[in-house]
Amino acid sequence: MAASVTITDADYLRIIIHGTTAFELLRTGLEFDLFELLEGAGGMDLKEVATAIGVEEQPARVLLLGLTSLLLLEKQGDKYVNSEMARRKLLRSGERFLGPLIDIQAKIINASLVDFAESMRQNTNVGLRHISGPGTTLYQRLTAHPELQKVFYDNMGDASQRAFAQILDRYDFSNIRHAIDIGGGDGTNSIELARRYPQLEMTVFDQESVTRLASQRIEDPDLHKRVHFHAGDLFADPLPQGADAILFFHIFEIWSLERNTELLRKCYDALPEGGVCLVYNFTSNDEGTGSMSGGLVSPYFLALASGEGMTYSPNDMEKAVLDAGFSRIERYQDMGFSHTLVVGHK
C-alpha cells in the first residue's frame, strides 16, 4: 500500500493558495529531468544538481527547496534524493508516471482556469478563448493545433489504458460481436478489446483528424482487419450500423445531463433489440461531496472543454440511461480510478 502524506491545516491551505507555484515547481523538475537524474546518480548535492541540469547554483537551490518542501525530494546528508512518492509517480519507470497528465495541464488546461468564475457567470466555456481555431469546444479547437492534439490524446490514451484494465476484469465481452467505440480517440480501448477477444470487431467513431492519428497506431495485420475507423460528428452524423454494442466511454462527463440523454437515445436507436450500451466514466460520489479528484477535474469541463459538463455521480448516469429508453440497467461500481460502469440493455 502506498504511504500517505500528512500535513498541517496551514500547509494544506498554502498548497491551495500557492497551487500555481507548486505545479510549476513540479513541472520544472520534470522539464529538467531532475527526478530521473537523481535516481540514476543515487542522489546529488546542490553543486552536482546545478551542473547536471545546466543552471547556476542559486536557481537550483530555489528548485530544490521547493520540491523538498512539497515532499517530492528528501535530503540525506548533503544529498537530495527522490521521495518514495516521486519514485512511484514521477519516474518513467514508476508504477504510475504522471508526465502525460502534467503535460496536458501545463500546455492546455491551466491557462483557461483563470476564466472559471466568468465561465460560471456565463454558464459557458469562456476559457476556450486561450486556444484559437474553429468550433465551440476544446475538441474542435484542437484540430487546428496538431501538437496540442497529440498532447491531449497522449494523456487520454494513458489514462484510458489504466482505467480500462478495470473494466476487463469486471465485464465479459465474449457475447458481443461488433462494438462501436463512440469518441474512441486514439483507439486504445478498441485495440485492447480486439486483442483480448479474437471474435470481436471494433469500430472507432470520432473526428476525422483523430481517427487518422489512431489508424496509424495499428501494426498487427489481424487487428487491422477487425479494428475500423469511422470519421464523423457525434451530434450531426448517423452512427455506424450493424453493431450489437456501443461503448460510451469518457464522454458522459463532457456534456450536460440533457445532452447526454439525447446522445444515449441516439445510441439506443442505433442498436438492435438485445443490444447494450456501456457507459463507463470517471465519477463523483452520489452524495456530491467528493472525491477530491472529481472536484478538481470538474472546472475544466465548464471553463474549457465544453462549457456544460462535470464529474457526475453514478446515479446521474443511471437516470440518463433509463431516460434514453433502455429497459434495464446494470451498475458496476468501485472499479478503481473512481470509475463506474452502467450498462443499458435494449
Image: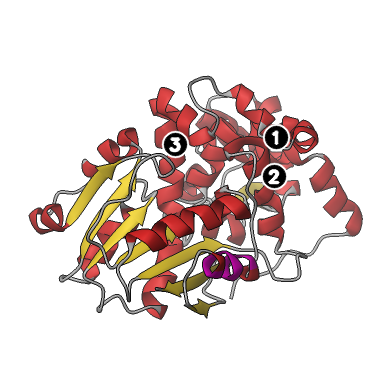
Q: Is disc 3 placed on a helix, strand or loop? A: helix
Residue 321 among magenta residues: yes
Residue at the (80%, 34%) spot, across then down: 121
Q: For the C terminus, which image quadrant?
A: bottom left
Picture coordinates of residue 148, whole percent (x, y):
45, 30
Which residue is identified by label 1? 113
Please identify the residue farthest to the left as the structure is shown: 221
Q: Look at the image and name its color scheme.
A: secondary structure
Image coords of residue 118 (percent x, y) = 78, 31
Tell me how far mark 3 sits from mark 1, CA to CA: 18 Å
Name the residue rendered at 76%, 70% in the picture: 287
Q: State the residue in front, 238 or 33.
A: 238
Q: Secondary structure at mark 1?
A: helix
Q: Is residue 139 left or right of residue 110?
A: left
Residue beneath disc 3: 151
Residue at x-position 27% and y-position 51%: 240
